């Protein structure tokens, strides 16, 4: 099984950006944690992060041609604005889990709307970085 982990704007700033919300662990810590879980599950993971919406769309489309089995996506702020990401996930038909480190529903009202959620098989929010592991297990059919 091959899983793509996509992260949107500012996720590369984990550990620096609002640590009271996102914690002190870094993006590299997140990747290491996911890779360790993937190794336990016997799956391959690849990572992509961009602050640019079009680059994320390109990565989703490329996942189709690379025969990716599942996508874990944290679209960051694009969650609340991007029809393009919604359409990209719909177009490839790859099972996708939306992940958020914080719980957007407990934050500012504009964060309560997720455009991409309509194309996702599940949403995991407010679980911190371990939410990514829950998403990985969900896509692999393992106990979360």
Image: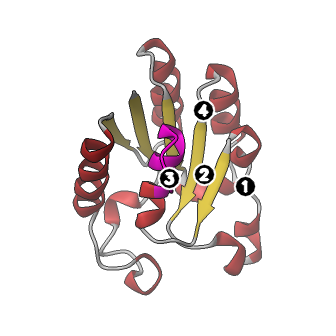
Which residue is at the far front? 143
Among the 4 quarters of the image, the one containing residue 105: bottom right
Identify the residue under disc 2: 78
**SS class, disc 4:** loop
Numbered range of the magenta stretch? 134-144
Q: CA distance from mark 4 to mark 1?
A: 17 Å
* Magenta highlight on residue 136: yes
Which sits earlier in the primary sequence, circle 4 or circle 1? 4
**Label 3: how many Cα within 10 Å (few below 14, some 14–19, many 20+):** few
The residue that disc 4 covers is: 95
Front tag of 2 and 4: 4
* Left or right position of 17 against 29: right
Between 35 and 9, which is closer to the camera in this rendering? 35
Q: Position of residue 106 (x, y in %)?
A: 69, 80
Q: Closer to the camera: disc 3 or disc 2? A: 3
Residue 72 drawn at (x, y percent): 49, 44
Q: Is residue 87 above or below residue 83?
A: above
The spot of residue 96 in percent (x, y) is 59, 38
Rendered location of residue 112, percent (x, y): 75, 67
Q: Are marks 2 and 4 in contact (CB under 8 Å)?
A: no
Q: Secondary structure at mark 3?
A: loop
Circle 1 is placed at which residue position? Answer: 114
For label 3, the residue is: 143
């Amino acid at each position: 099984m091959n899983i793509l982990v996509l992260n949107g704007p500012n996720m590369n700033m984990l550990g620096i950006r609002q640590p009271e919300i996102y914690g002190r662990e870094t993006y590299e810590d997140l990747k290491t944690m996911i890779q360790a879980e993937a190794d336990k599950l016997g799956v391959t993971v690849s990572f992509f992060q961009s602050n640019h919406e079009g680059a994320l769309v390109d990565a989703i489309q490329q996942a189709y041609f690379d025969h990716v089995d599942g996508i874990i996506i944290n679209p960051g702020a694009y969650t609340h604005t991007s029809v393009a990401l919604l359409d990209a996930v719909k177009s490839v038909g790859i099972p996708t889990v939306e992940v958020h480190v914080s719980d957007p529903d407990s934050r500012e009202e504009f964060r309560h709307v997720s455009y991409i959620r309509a194309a996702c098989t599940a949403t995991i929010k407010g679980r911190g970085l371990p939410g990514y592991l829950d998403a990985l297990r969900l896509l692999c059919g393992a106990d979360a």
